[in-house]
Image (spheres, helix red, strand yellow):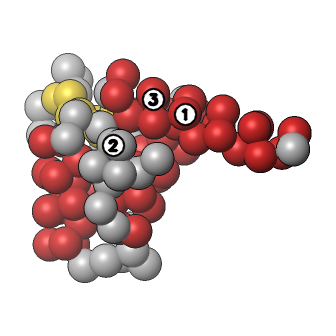
Amino acid sequence: MNKRYRINDSKELLVLEAVLDAHIDGVEFVVLDLILLNEIASQATLHSVMKGLILKKMIKTETCTRDGRRKFVLPTKHGLAWLKDCSELLATFHHQ
């Protein structure tokens, strides 16, 4: 599944999952929140992973209208499709 979406390593997967978790929970998730996930990797690595996921169209950033210094990190339709495909795959295995 991850090869189809070009997710190459565990850091990309963990960052994508963090963005999707926040989105599903309705929690604002900003670039600073992502950069502070130091249990995944260093700040520089996380920034690089974020840029890679943006290039793969899995996540996107949107500037906050109230404070132009803040950027929200959100899943794209492609990122949400990955989550749907994973859910369907798990449901298939669960029923077997």
Q: Secondary structure at mark 2?
A: loop
Indicate left or right for 61 with 90 as reference. left
Tell me where residue 18 appears, x and y as whole percent: 46, 52
Contact check, label 1 and label 3, Cβ < 8 Å:
no
Of the two numbered discs 1 and 2 on the same chain, state the one appearing first in sequence. Answer: 2
State the image quarter where residue 15 is shown.
bottom left
Q: Amino acid at mark 2?
A: Tyr
Instruction: Look at mark 3 in the image and give the residue it sits on.
Output: 80
Report how far apart the C-alphas of labels 2 and 3 lie in the structure.
11 Å
| Viewer-nearest residue: 85 or 74 | 85
The relative height of residue 74 versus residue 31 in the rendered view (above or below) is above
Residue shown at the point (24%, 66%) measured from the top left: 46
Of the two numbered discs 1 and 3 on the same chain, state the one appearing first in sequence. Answer: 3
Tell me where residue 42 appears, x and y as whole percent: 25, 79
| Viewer-nearest residue: 3 or 28 | 3
State the image quarter where residue 10 is shown.
bottom left
Residue 85: image tag: 1
Residue shown at the point (87%, 44%) measured from the top left: 96
Task: Count the numbered circles shown.
Answer: 3
Query: Which residue extends farthest front?
Result: 96
Indicate left or right for 7 with 81 as reference. left
Instruction: Look at mark 2 in the image and give the residue it sits on.
Output: 5
The relative height of residue 39 versus residue 58 in the rendered view (above or below) is below
Report how far apart the C-alphas of labels 1 and 3 lie in the structure.
9 Å
Q: Secondary structure at mark 3?
A: helix
Residue shown at the point (39%, 74%) measured from the top left: 40
